[in-house]
Image: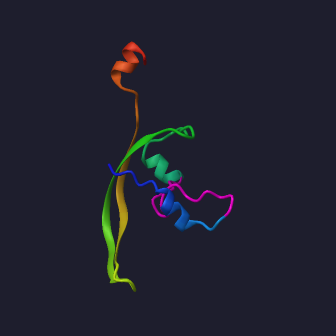
């Protein structure tokens, strides 16, 4: 998996000088799941804030674009529509459960 967290330099590009530190991840990588989606995924109880889940998803490419920038840079964009997904709560390793953590 690729860590999508923004570098400190990228955070500065997203925000103007202020007390706000800027986003930790780029816009659009956040999935907001409504009641119906949570029910379909079998999540009957709300997870605790900070819980970690593995998310597996299938996505269909809806739109692609490419362009040349003013200073010779090339820009690319791919728009993905998630069509199916699953979430599995990350569990501690079996050895940790059996023998405890060091």
**Number of marks:** 0
Q: Residue 78: percent from the left, percent from the top?
A: 34, 71
Q: Residue furthest top?
A: 99
- Report the front residue among 34 and 87: 87
**Quadrant location of residue 29?**
bottom left
| Residue 52 lies in the magenta stretch | no
Q: Residue 15: percent from the left, percent from the top?
A: 59, 66
| Residue 21 lies in the magenta stretch | yes
**Quadrant location of residue 63?**
bottom left
Instruction: Judge left or right: residue 76 versus residue 89.
Output: left
Q: Looking at the picture, does residue 12 appear above or below residue 38?
A: below
Instruction: Judge left or right: residue 44 versus residue 84.
Output: right
Q: Residue 86: percent from the left, percent from the top?
A: 37, 47
- Report the front residue among 72 and 47: 72
Q: Quadrant of the C terminus?
A: top left
Q: Chief secondary structure of the magenta span?
A: loop
Residue at 40% across / 27% down in the picture? 92
Q: Looking at the picture, does residue 83 appear above or below residue 101?
A: below
Q: Looking at the picture, does residue 100 appear above or below residue 90?
A: above
Q: Looking at the picture, does residue 41 appear above or below residue 79?
A: above
Q: Residue 57: percent from the left, percent from the top?
A: 34, 53
**Quadrant location of residue 60?**
bottom left
- Report the front residue among 91 and 11: 11
Residue at 47% across / 57% down in the picture? 6
Residue at 62% across / 68% down in the picture? 16
Q: Residue furthest bottom?
A: 70
Point out the stretch of residues depicted in magenta: 18-34
Residue 42 showing in the rendered view: yes
How is the structure coloured here? rainbow
Instruction: Judge left or right: residue 14 versus residue 29.
Output: right
Residue 31 showing in the rendered view: no
């Amino acid at each position: 998996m690729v860590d999508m967290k923004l570098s400190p330099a990228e955070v500065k590009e997203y925000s103007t000088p202020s007390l706000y530190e800027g986003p930790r991840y780029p816009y659009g990588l956040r999935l907001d799941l409504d009641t119906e989606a949570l029910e379909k995924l079998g999540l009957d109880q709300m997870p605790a804030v900070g819980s970690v889940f593995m998310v597996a998803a299938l996505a269909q490419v809806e739109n692609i674009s490419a362009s040349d920038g003013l200073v010779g840079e090339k820009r690319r964009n791919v728009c993905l529509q998630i069509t199916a997904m699953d979430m599995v709560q990350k569990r501690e390793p079996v050895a940790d459960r059996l023998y405890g953590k060091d």
